[in-house]
Each structure stands twice: as structure tokens, then as C-alpha cells.
Image (cartoon, rainbow, N blue to C red):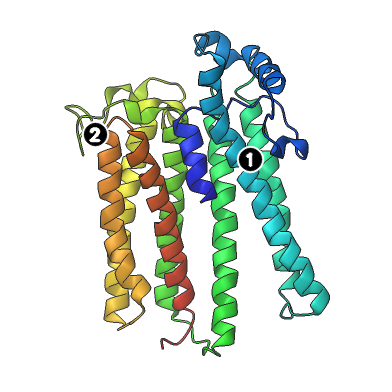
Amino acid sequence: MMIIIGAITRLSESGLSMVEWRPLIGAIPPMNEAEWNRIFDLYKQSPEFNKENFWMELSDFKQIFFWEWFHRLLGRLIGVIYLVPFLFFLVKGWIPKGYGKALFGLFILGGAQGLMGWYMVKSGLVDVPDVSHYRLAAHLSLALVILSAMLWLGLSFWKMSIKATFKPDTALYNHGLIVLLLLILTILWGAYTAGLDAGLVYNNSFPKMGNNWIPEEIWFYQPIWKNFFENQAGVQFTHRWFAMITALVIISFVLHAGYKKRSEKSFVFLSVMIFAQVTLGIATLFSQVNLHIAVTHQAGAVILLSTVIFCLHASRFKQP
């Protein structure tokens, strides 16, 4: 939910509406007109207002403010909902041996994610009213690391509770690691695509980019490698091909699992989800990054990553 709200915040261009960092009292929204005017006056000093949103009235500002405030509030709530039960379980001695440090480490990562979010926002409050796409990618990546680690630990506790037999299928597991690496790269370049608004170019053709397989602008920057990180056409090109290669490798992973007669439903769901995600990606492109479709596409990436984690974890145990 946090990652989806983050996508809405980004795509609705609401992320720079809160220009101050108040970790504690920032959870409380403006409660009166005077406070609303104070934070609106602060926003009026930002590059985004001066260069893009100078037409806004207070009523317009309230709409973009909501998503950024809600995104930060949800982050705080996640921290509380995680920490309180963790401390209770710790005092009670209910945490399995060897897992205490890992669970505490997740809480530290959550705090680091809050700092990373503010570090990202700060990059859009200086001169150019856009956050750094590198910091945006780092913010999303850390969120996915936290999600994946929580899911992996949760699956480990579940396997422990049902006394599952640890019997790794090394070949299938290594195949899954390749899938995971390619999926991470695809999502990373998806974040670059979002941060650079690269989905707004070449959005009327697929798989070609216009009349060419390789866009002419891909050689614009020097050195050449910068085009794959900072050139809109180059970033979208890279995201497209990582996605298609990842889809093919995922299909091979599912076929590998079928050959090994793995019966877990996660492998079946993975085969369905990869086709859905590719379709959502193309739809996002052709819709010129329609907010609803684009948010669903990001949610699909999270579901796809989670399903790969399920499959990886399953390959470490004897199938039921």
C-alpha cells in the first residue's frame, strides 16, 4: 500500500508540496486556515511553484498536499505498527533464536527509508522543480528491499511453523536468482523512466521506437553510457528491453519448475502475472502514462517481485 501511494504521489506531481521536514508534528495535518496559509506561503517559495504551479490557489494546493502528507503519515504508521509488536515479542521472548537482529535491522531500514525520502524531496527544492531520478530510484529500491526482506522472513516463519523439510533445488534456485536480478534491473530502469518522464516519448509504437529499433537520440550524450541513465529515449529503450528479456527468462523459469514437477501455486501465478505486467507496461506507454494505468503497472511490479520471492523460497524446501 505504501509503494502504491508513493506511485500516486509521484504521478500526480504531489511530492514537492511539503517543503519542510517535521518528523513528529508533521503527522498532524493543518488544522486551521492560518496553518494552511503558512505552509502554502512556504510552498510559494519553492521552484515548483515559481516555475510550474504559479497559477495555484490554496484550494489547488490542498489537493496535491494531501497525497504527500498521506504518504508520510503512512510511513510513520508502518514504523509504529512494526516497532510496538516487535518490542512486545522481544520482551516476551517469542522471537525465534537468530531472528532478533534481522527483525531489528528491518526497523532500522524503515527509518533509513524515511531519511531517503526526504533526501529525494530535497533534490527538487533547489533550482529545478524535479526530484533526482537517481534518488527516486534509490527510494523505490529501498522500499522493495524492505518488502522483500519482510516477505522472506515471513515465509521462513511459516515454513518453521509447518516443519517443512529443507531440501534446496540448487538449479531451480539459481535460475530464480537470475530472474530476480533481471527483475531488479527492470524495476530500477522503470524508476528512471518515471523520474525522467521518459514514458512521454515514443508512446505510440512498440516494440519499435518510432520507425527504428534503436532511437536516434540514444547517441546524444557523451560519454555514450550516460544515454542509458539520463537520456529519455535511452532510458525508455533500456527499460523496454530489460522487461522483454526478463519476461522470457521468467517463462523459462516457470517451465523449469514444471519440468521439476513443482506443484506450488506461486509458479503458476508467476506465469500469469508476467503476461499481465507486460500488457500493463505497454498500456501505460500507449496511454501517455495515464495515472490509473501507471499506478497499476507499479503495483504489478511489486506483485511480480513478491511472487518471485515466493518461488525462490519454495525452491529451498521439499514441495508439499
Element under disc 2: helix
Name the residue that disc number 2 marks.
286
- Viewer-nearest residue: 155 or 2: 2
Residue 185: image x %, image y %? Answer: 44, 48
Left of 102 or right of it: where is 261?
left
Left of 97 or right of it: where is 307?
left
Q: Is residue 300 above or below residue 193?
A: below
Q: Is residue 270 above or below residue 287?
A: below
- Viewer-nearest residue: 263 or 184: 263
Can residue 267 be seen from the camera position used here?
yes
Residue occupying the point 49% across, 12% down = 52
Quadrant in which residue 259 is drawn: bottom left
Query: Of the residues shown, which amino acid type is indicated by label 1?
Result: Arg
**First along the sequence among labels 2 and 1:** 1
The image quadrant where one finds the C terminus is bottom left
Question: Could you classify mark 2 by the number of other residues whose Cα lies within 10 Å: few (under 14), some (14-19), or many (20 or more)?
Answer: some
